[in-house]
Structures are given as structure tokens and as C-alpha cells.
């Protein structure tokens, strides 16, 4: 199916199936900042429509963040959970992809300004730049306790974890005595729980066969959470089951305690020093700084307050989606996770198309399908909200988690590769990505 659009003297033919156009592209320009869950979904739903879209991202690839911890634990490779944004969207002729970091947004002049100095005009802006790790003002802690937010972080964490065993093994070869190894995870939300569970699982079931002197299964793993319970967003029954599953894996869980300082090799728990070989930060995220660059009201976390059409009040041509948007429905804040981000991106695209067709805008509603967290192999907790309501834990929740995550991975090739790797890992109890990638400045340099 195709239709003809005219602009001045230009006649444009738009093929809605392939998204290809003959002649110049159509008049309205849509700038999408961020090729994450929200931005990609918005772009996909504008494919072949009568707008010209530019997707700008500082990375050339989309990252499936829910599986980052498996890269950090050497189960998956970076390429299993990333996909070039061009390969997701490149075939659509009305979509350009631009690699670059956005520095400023001028709402008055409708321009996006990149760090490179390049300027891009827009008629509609979809701002979906996500969130970053937050150390609550203690930025120095990031040197000693990396967070898990990107592929670069995941590879760094993998290197730090595996290096500890190499160092202990080397000491064992020299002196036949091996040091104790203690890993500390700070933050008992889904990311912290998944990290702690996966470290325990990989130490006990995978790495243990790799070494002659060090015994990875004897490594201690501690999880610290400042609140009264882990998995705060889950129902109490699932919190308790998640806790039991972590304990079964040998993770020492400490709730209601605060980390007061972090140094290289140690964390301070309520002021008391605890030795830690590797400390990982999963305690805080903050909305992307581009929210503040918009110059519109923010909530206390720094997310952009938007109305039911996902616009900051008084800015109908600016849509803010995903982790960066503070959306409230029925008095409840919509969580900053992947499903709402994708739904917001899709809805913003629909509203742009409605505008162009002269149709009325419809408000955004979040369709909650539930949430899940996995705890090592064969264990998980799941709050199912659709197509029926249920609360599962253990193996059934884990299988649900596997199916859901596989189905949301972008591309059949990635789905097949990840499925194969999971089966291989499950059957052989080994992982294929146990690579220590030493950065130019490595943790070893300090020695
Ligand atoms: C370790 C981890 C595990 C998670 N697990 C789950 C889970 O199991 N289930 C779940 O539902 N959610 C999970 N989440 C949360 C989920 O990934 C996020 O809610 C989701 O990615 C938000 O989508 P988004 O589009 O708003 O932002 P993102 O997906 O983060 O995308 C933002 C994009 O903007 C780009 N960007 C940022 N700033 C700029 C700039 N200045 N210029 C250009 N580009 C820029 C970034 O490069 C990025 O590509 C997890 C998150 C993490 C970190």
C-alpha cells in the first residue's frame, strides 16, 4: 500500500509496507533521542508513516538491559544482548540513525544540539534517554563499586570477578594457601538480587571446576539492602520466597543496614569496615540529565513530569518516555522498567500519527503484565498480572522468566543464540564467555 504526499513542489510516494519513499521525505521531522526500549518502539511505530524520523543515540547499539547481569557473569556474550540500531531500523527509508551524544535541547527553536556541535531541527521530539546509575552524591564510590548499566559496565564487572579468582589461584600456586574471597552487592532490588544470585550460582556450579587451588564455591557473597526487605516492589510473599532462594544459594542477606562508605577492598556497613574483594553497586538509578536540559518541571528524582499524553505541560510536541518520564496513573507512579518504556514509546508514535492525520489524541494507559526477578539457575519470583493474576516462585517462575525474556530479545538470531547458550550452560554447567578483558588501566595496575 502506498500514498502520495505533497509538500511545496515535491511529490512524495510513501510505501507503507517497506517504509520506502520516492522523492524527498515528508514534511514533519521527528527527533527521537535514545535507542533504548522506548525510543526503538517509537521509531518502529513511525516506520513508513508520513514523517521523517532521526533516532539519535550515543551508542551504535540497543542493549537488552535485563540480561546485562548474564554478561557480567560470563554466561552470555555482549553481542547476544545488543543489536545495532541501524540493523533494527535501517531498512525503513523514513528513518535515519545518527550516532552522537545530545548535549542540549532548545524547545524555543525546536532544535537538538549534539556534543559535536551538530544541530537538528524537529517538529516533534521524543525524549527517551533513560536513566543512569546514581551514588546519591557519593560519586567517588563508582571507582570502587561499579554499577551495572551498560555493556561496558558488564564487561568490567566480569573482569573484576574473574580476576579475583586468578589472583587467589596464583597465590595458591605460590604458597598453597588461598585467600578468602568475599563479593558484596549493594542494593536489594531486582538487579542486586539477580546479580547476587547469579554470582553464587556461577561460583558454585561453573567456576568451581576451573581452578586447582582456589575453591570458587567457598567464595562468600553478601547482599546489603537499606530498606526492611529485598525486592521492595514485589508482594510480601514473593519477597520472602526470594529471600529464601538467595539463602539456599548461600548468599548472606542483610536488610535494614546502610552502606556509609566504600573504599577499594572494603565497604563500611553503618560505619563498620567489612573486607570486600569486589563490590557491586545496584542501589540507585537517576533519570538521564537530559530531563533537566529540557527546562520543564521535574519530580524529586529528576524525572520529567508529563501529562496523560506524555507531554511536559504546555509542550504538546515534546514526548518524554521510559525511565525519564514521571507518569502517574490512578495516583500511582508507573515503574521505571522495560514494559512501560515500550508502551510509552509506542503511544508517543501513535499520538504523532494522530496529529498528522488530524485525529484526536488518546491518553496513555499502562498495561501491567507483571514483573519478575531470577535468582540463579532454576529459581525466580514472578508476579503475573496478565493474562491472569498469579504469584509464582521457584522453577515455574524461572521458566516463565526464560520464555518472557527470550521473546522480548530483538531478532530471531539473538533468540536462537541465547536459547542455545542457556541450554548449553544448563546441561554442561559451563559458560562460554569466561574472558578476562583487561582494560588499558586495569585493577591489576594498582598492585
Ligand atoms: C541491569 C538492569 C536490569 C534490568 N532488568 C529489568 C528487568 O528484568 N525487567 C524490566 O522490565 N526492566 C529491567 N530493567 C530496566 C529497563 O532496562 C529500563 O527500564 C529500560 O531500559 C528503560 O528504557 P528507556 O528507553 O527509558 O531507556 P534505555 O533503555 O536505558 O535507553 C536509553 C538510551 O538513550 C541513550 N542516551 C542516553 N543519554 C543520551 C544522550 N545524551 N545522547 C544520546 N543518547 C543518549 C542511551 O545510550 C540508551 O541507548 C533493568 C535495567 C538494568 C540496568
Image (cartoon, helix red, strand yellow):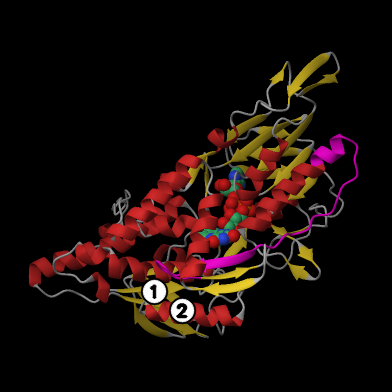
Looking at this view, is 314 or 8 the one in front? 8
User: Which residue was labeled with disc 2?
Assistant: 224
Mark-to-mark CA distance, 2 and 1: 8 Å
Q: Tell whether 78 sits left or right of 8.
A: left
Q: Is residue 146 magenta?
A: no
Is ligand 1 within 8 Å of the beta carbon of the residue shown at mark 1? no
Indicate which disc, 2 or 1, sits on the residue closer to the N terminus.
1
Circles 2 and 1, Cβ within 8 Å, touching? The answer is: yes
The quarter of the picture showing ligand 1: bottom right
Q: Tell whether 27 sits left or right of 59.
A: right
Pinpoint residue 292: horizontal percent, then vertical percent.
Answer: 70, 55
Looking at this view, is 244 or 200 the one in front? 244
User: Which residue was labeled with disc 1?
Assistant: 184
The segment highlighted magenta reads: 352-380
The vertical placement of 157 against 231, above or below, is: above
For the C terminus, the quadrant is bottom left
Q: Residue at (44%, 60%) from the top-left corner? A: 69
Quadrant hosting residue 133? bottom right
Packing grade of label 2 (10 A; few <14, some 14-19, many >=20) is many
Q: Residue at (47%, 56%) from the top-left corner? A: 67
Under circle 1, the secondary element is: strand
Looking at this view, is 51 or 130 the one in front? 51
Q: Tell whether 266 sits left or right of 231.
A: left
Amino acid at each position: 500500500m502506498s500514498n502520495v504526499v505533497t509538500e511545496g513542489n515535491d511529490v512524495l510516494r510513501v510505501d507503507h509496507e517497506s517504509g520506502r519513499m520516492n522523492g524527498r521525505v515528508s514534511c514533519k521531522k521527528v527527533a527521537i533521542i535514545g535507542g533504548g526500549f522506548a525510543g526503538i518502539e517509537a521509531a518502529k511505530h513511525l516506520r513508513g508513516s508520513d514523517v521523517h524520523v532521526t533516532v539519535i543515540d550515543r551508542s551504535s547499539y540497543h542493549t537488552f538491559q535485563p540480561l546485562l547481569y548474564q554478561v557480567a557473569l560470563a554466561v552470555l556474550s555482549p553481542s547476544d544482548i545488543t543489536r545495532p540500531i541501524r540493523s533494527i531500523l535501517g531498512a525503513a527509508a523514513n528513518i535515519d540513525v545518527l550516532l552522537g551524544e545530545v548535549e542540549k535541547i532548545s524547545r524555543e527553536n525546536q532544535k537538538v544540539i549534539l556534543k559535536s556541535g551538530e544541530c537538528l531541527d524537529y517538529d516533534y521530539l521524543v525524549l527517551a534517554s533513560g536513566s543512569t546509575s546514581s551514588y546519591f552524591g557519593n560519586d567517588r564510590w563508582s571507582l570502587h563499586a561499579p554499577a551495572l548499566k551498560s555493556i561496558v559496565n558488564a564487561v568490567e564487572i566480569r573482569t573484576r570477578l574473574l580476576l579475583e579468582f586468578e589472583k587467589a589461584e596464583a597465590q595458591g600456586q605460590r604458597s598453597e594457601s588461598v585467600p578468602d574471597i568475599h563479593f558484596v552487592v549493594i542494593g536489594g532490588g531486582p538487579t542486586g538480587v539477580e546479580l547476587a544470585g547469579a554470582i553464587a550460582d556461577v561460583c558454585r556450579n561453573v567456576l568451581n571446576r576451573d581452578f586447582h587451588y582456589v575453591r570458587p564455591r567457598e567464595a562468600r557473597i553478601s547482599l546489603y539492602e537499606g530498606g526492611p526487605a529485598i525486592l521492595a516492589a514485589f508482594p510480601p510473599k514473593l519477597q520472602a520466597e526470594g529471600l529464601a532462594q538467595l539463602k539456599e544459594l548461600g548468599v548472606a542477606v542483610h536488610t535494614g543496614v546502610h552502606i556509609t562508605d566504600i573504599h577499594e577492598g572494603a565497604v563500611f556497613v553503618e560505619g563498620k569496615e567489612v573486607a570486600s574483594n569486589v563490590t557491586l553497586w545496584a542501589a540507585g538509578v537517576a533519570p538521564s540529565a537530559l530531563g533537566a536540559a529540557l527546562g520543564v518541571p521535574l519530580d524529586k528524582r529528576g524525572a520529567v513530569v508529563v501529562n496523560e499524553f506524555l507531554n511536559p505541560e504546555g509542550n504538546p510536541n515534546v514526548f518524554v518516555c521510559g525511565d525519564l518520564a514521571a507518569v502517574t496513573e490512578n495516583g500511582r507512579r508507573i515503574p521505571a522498567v522495560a514494559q512501560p518504556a515500550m508502551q510509552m514509546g509506542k503511544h508517543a508514535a501513535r499520538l504523532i500519527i494522530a496529529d498528522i492525520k488530524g485525529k484526536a489524541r488518546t491518553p496513555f494507559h499502562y498495561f501491567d503484565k507483571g514483573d519478575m526477578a531470577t535468582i540463579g539457575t532454576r529459581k525466580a519470583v514472578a508476579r503475573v498480572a496478565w493474562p491472569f493474576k498469579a504469584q509464582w516462585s521457584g522453577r515455574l517462575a524461572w521458566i516463565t522468566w526464560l520464555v518472557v525474556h527470550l521473546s522480548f530479545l530483538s531478532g530471531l538470531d539473538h533468540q536462537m543464540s541465547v536459547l542455545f547458550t542457556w541450554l548449553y550452560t544448563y546441561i554442561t554447567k559451563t559458560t562460554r564467555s569466561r574472558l578476562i578483558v583487561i582494560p588499558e588501566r586495569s585493577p591489576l595496575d594498582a598492585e
